[in-house]
Image (cartoon, helix red, strand yellow):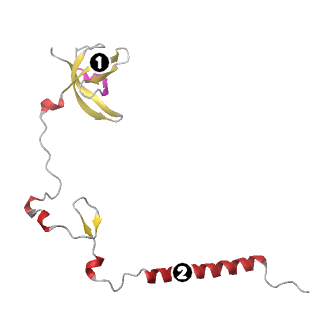
Amino acid sequence: MSKSQQSFNKKEREKLKRKKKQDKREKREERKANSQKGLPLEEMFSYVDENGNLTSTPPDPSKKIKIKAEDIPLGVPKREEIDPADLIRTGKVTTFYNSKGYGFIRDLDSQESLFFHVKSLPEGVQVDEGDTVNFEVEMGPKGANAANVRPAVA
């Protein structure tokens, strides 16, 4: 007897092809069965309710809110002027290395710790740990820093 002309791999590939064709045929029939063709236009609509969810019921016209086109802001709103008094914060010097020339201030409002350097102190002014100071916040290369550090007036 002679050997079969088809190898195992060849049989497996043919079996996979037949399975793919069968799957494709089943999907096509399922799409035809669930087709939306022939439905009235109103049944194909979907609406968005007041919560932003999709729904099949139209919105209630009595709940409609009228908005004038002039009331819709376009672009970026103008920046409000910042009061210079709001920029000045109060904090307490938590650590200060006099030999190295820098320290840290804890903001009393936000409890944020900010770095400051002796260059941000006015000439002749000294601060020690535990002193209450007024300062401004500026962004440095490594984050927020305290600038214009002055002893707080009691």
The residue depicted at 40 percent of the width and 82 percent of the height is: 35
- Residue 65, x across and y down, in percent: 12, 62
Task: Categorize mark 1 by other alpha carbons within 10 Å: few (<14), some (14-19), many (20+).
Answer: many
Quarter holding residue 143: top left
Q: Amino acid at mark 1?
A: Val
**Quarter of the picture holding the N terminus:** bottom right
The residue depicted at 18 percent of the width and 17 percent of the height is: 152
**Quarter of the picture holding the C terminus:** top left
Q: Amino acid at mark 2?
A: Glu
Q: Secondary structure at mark 1?
A: strand
Q: Nearer the viewer, residue 125 or 12?
A: 12
The residue depicted at 37 percent of the width and 81 percent of the height is: 36
Residues drawn in magenta? 112-122
Q: Nearer the viewer, residue 131 or 24?
A: 24
- Which comes before the other along the chain, label 1 or label 2? 2
Instruction: Classify 135 as above or below 18.
Output: above
- Residue 61, x across and y down, in percent: 13, 68
Mark 2 and mark 1 in contact (Cβ < 8 Å)? no
The Cα–Cα distance between marks 1 and 2, rounded to whole angstroms, is 75 Å
- Residue 48, x across and y down, in percent: 25, 66
* Residue position marked by numbered label 2 in the rendering: 26
Whether the magenta-drawn stretch holds residue 121 is answered as yes
Position of residue 38 in the picture relative to residue 135 (left or right): right
Whether the magenta-drawn stretch holds residue 91 is answered as no
Q: Secondary structure at mark 2?
A: helix
